């Protein structure tokens, strides 16, 4: 991903695939699925049990992730085993966790992008935010 294009239209076109990638990761359910698949391949039933989501919801998320080229599956009897399609996704997930840790999860408090049903306390390193003015 190159962010050095000077023409705004060219930059927008060049960044579109990266924006689509991050939109595919923007759902907490899909992100949780990727987190589990980063450790080992799993069946839909395993993901349903681990996440407490409905089977249809997990299947829909997996279809989205498969369509985006982020997961793939292999048949195992009557079931399918899902896994990350690219090992680089592990690095991306790890980097995201590192950024969240370094910023004290500040993005969770962002009025534009915070998830309304999730409350995150700032980490001690990030402070309370009162001094940021």
Image (cartoon, helix red, strand yellow):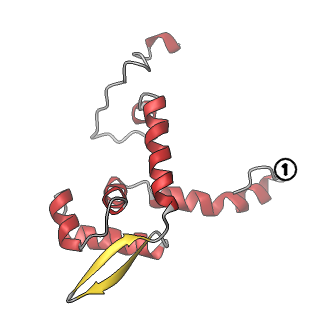
Q: Is residue 38 left or right of residue 76?
A: right
Q: Quadrant of residue 126?
A: top left
91 vs 17: above or below: above
Q: Residue 45 appears at what percent x and percent y?
A: 17, 71
Q: Quadrant of residue 117?
A: top left
Q: Residue 123 appears at what percent x and percent y?
A: 37, 23
61 vs 7: above or below: below
**Label 1 residue SS:** loop
Q: Is residue 116 left or right of residue 131?
A: left
- Nearest the camera: 2 or 116? 2
Q: Residue furthest right?
A: 6
Which residue lies under the disc numbered 1? 6
- Residue at 78 percent across and 58 percent down: it is 9
Q: Quadrant of residue 104?
A: top left
State the count of labels.
Answer: 1
Q: Residue 74 appears at what percent x and percent y?
A: 34, 83
Q: Residues within 10 Å of mark 1 (few under 14, many from 20)?
A: few
- Residue at 52 percent across and 14 percent down: it is 132
Q: Is residue 125 left or right of residue 39?
A: right
- Nearest the camera: 52 or 119? 52
- Residue at 49 percent across and 67 percent down: it is 86
46 vs 101: above or below: below
56 vs 5: above or below: below
Q: Residue furthest top?
A: 131
- Residue at 74 percent across and 55 percent down: it is 2
Classify the position of the N terminus by image quarter: bottom right
Q: Is residue 82 left or right of residue 44?
A: right
Q: Residue 50 appears at what percent x and percent y?
A: 18, 59
């Amino acid at each position: 991903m190159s962010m050095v294009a000077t023409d705004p239209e060219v930059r927008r076109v060049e960044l579109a695939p990266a924006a689509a990638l991050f939109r595919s990761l923007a759902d907490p359910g899909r992100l949780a699925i990727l987190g589990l698949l980063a450790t080992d391949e799993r069946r839909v039933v395993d993901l349903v049990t681990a996440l407490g989501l409905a089977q249809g919801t997990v299947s829909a998320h997996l279809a989205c992730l498969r369509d985006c080229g982020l997961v793939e599956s292999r048949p195992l009897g009557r079931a399918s085993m899902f896994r990350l399609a690219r090992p680089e996704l592990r690095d991306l997930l790890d980097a995201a966790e590192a950024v969240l840790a370094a910023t004290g999860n500040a993005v969770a408090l962002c009025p534009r992008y915070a998830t309304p049903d999730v409350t995150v306390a700032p980490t001690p390193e990030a402070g309370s935010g009162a001094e940021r003015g």
